[in-house]
Image: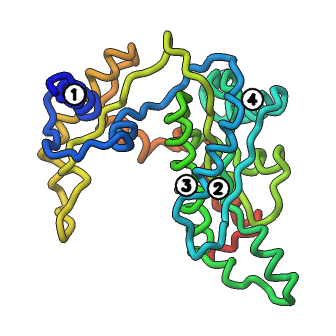
Amino acid sequence: MTAFVDTKAALLEQRYGANQQKPTNIIWTPQVEAMLSHKSVRTFLPDALPDGALETMVASAQSASNSSGFNQWSVVAVTDRELKQKLSNTIARTVPTDRIPWIEEAPVLLLWVADLSRNAEITREQGSEPVVLEYLDSFLMASIDATLAAQNASLAAESIGLGIVYLGVMRNAAKEVAEIVNLPSNSFVTFGMAVGHPDTTRTSSIRPRPAQPVVLHHNSYEQGRYREYVDGYEDACLAFRTKQEMKPKTWRGAVHEGATSMSYMGGRENLRETVIARGFKLR
């Protein structure tokens, strides 16, 4: 029992840092422990995925909640080395680096697609125009469903010993990425996901999250309450960055940069135009 308690306490310390407030009444199950153990993996071995891994991930993705049962998402599994390198090079040009090694190293790059194309075709085949799909909510619904599916897939991947990292940078070059993988109208890549066997000699640690009162509100939103907990979170972030030999940066500084630096967007400032050009009217 003591070993069990020590293991769980160590996991909570990794998730919240040494000095932040931590929940004391977690209901531990294997699934909860797996989720609290999640970490982004950016270092991969060259080994192929186990046989059946991709199908297991997609079956899990298809088991996620799905808006009205419309199935408005798809996933493109990129395993061809040259194609994956082309996508990596395309994205690398949008950020201050020559290459993105985790895209190159991972044996599989999954592109999660908000996909209204099938439903548009099915509607037209029945003699009608899919006018509802022109509205913002349809775009949002497809994007949410793709995200829910991807999260299920990531949990499945981690349960069989694989590692993943989400790749929002795919939106930096949304137009080019869609063209490279031949997406139809009414679809776009919401984000990517690199998947593979983690290289445990280089893999990262669990990144801490803020104390629960920063994000958990009871019955009504308490604006500004987060301020009481930011200093504790800054300490946890600094300890993480120091351990990972990352350059010093505060969480406040990162938030400020993300909200003020157009270079941070890397091309996503053009996303609205790209999405509209791909058939999402966003009315």
Q: In which quarter of the image is the C terminus?
A: bottom right
Residue 72 percent coordinates (x, y)? 67, 66
Q: How crowded is mark 1: few (under 14 residues within 10 Å), some or many (20 or more)?
A: few
Classify mark 1: helix, strand or loop. helix
Q: Residues within 10 Å of mark 2 (few under 14, many from 20)?
A: some
Q: Which mark is residue 147?
A: 3
Give the alpha-carbon distance from disc 1 to disc 2, as whole Å: 47 Å
Residue 49 percent coordinates (x, y)? 68, 28
Q: In this rendering, which labeled residue sits more in front, label 1 or label 2?
A: 1
| Position of 219 relative to 177 (above/below) | below
Residue located farthest toward the bottom when viewing the structure as drawn: 127
Question: What residue type is disc 2 on?
Answer: Leu
Q: Are marks 2 and 4 in contact (CB under 8 Å)?
A: no
Question: What residue type is disc 1 on?
Answer: Phe
- The residue singled out by tag 4 in the image is 89
Q: How crowded is mark 3: few (under 14 residues within 10 Å), some or many (20 or more)?
A: many
Q: In this rendering, which labeled residue sits more in front, label 3 or label 4?
A: 3
Q: In this rendering, which labeled residue sits more in front, label 2 or label 4?
A: 4
Q: Residue 4 carries which label?
A: 1
Q: In this rendering, which labeled residue sits more in front, label 3 or label 2?
A: 3
Q: Which of marks 1 and 4 is nearer the N terminus?
A: 1
Q: In this view, does 133 lie to the left or right of 39?
A: right
Question: What residue type is disc 4 on?
Answer: Asn
Q: Which mark is residue 271?
A: 2
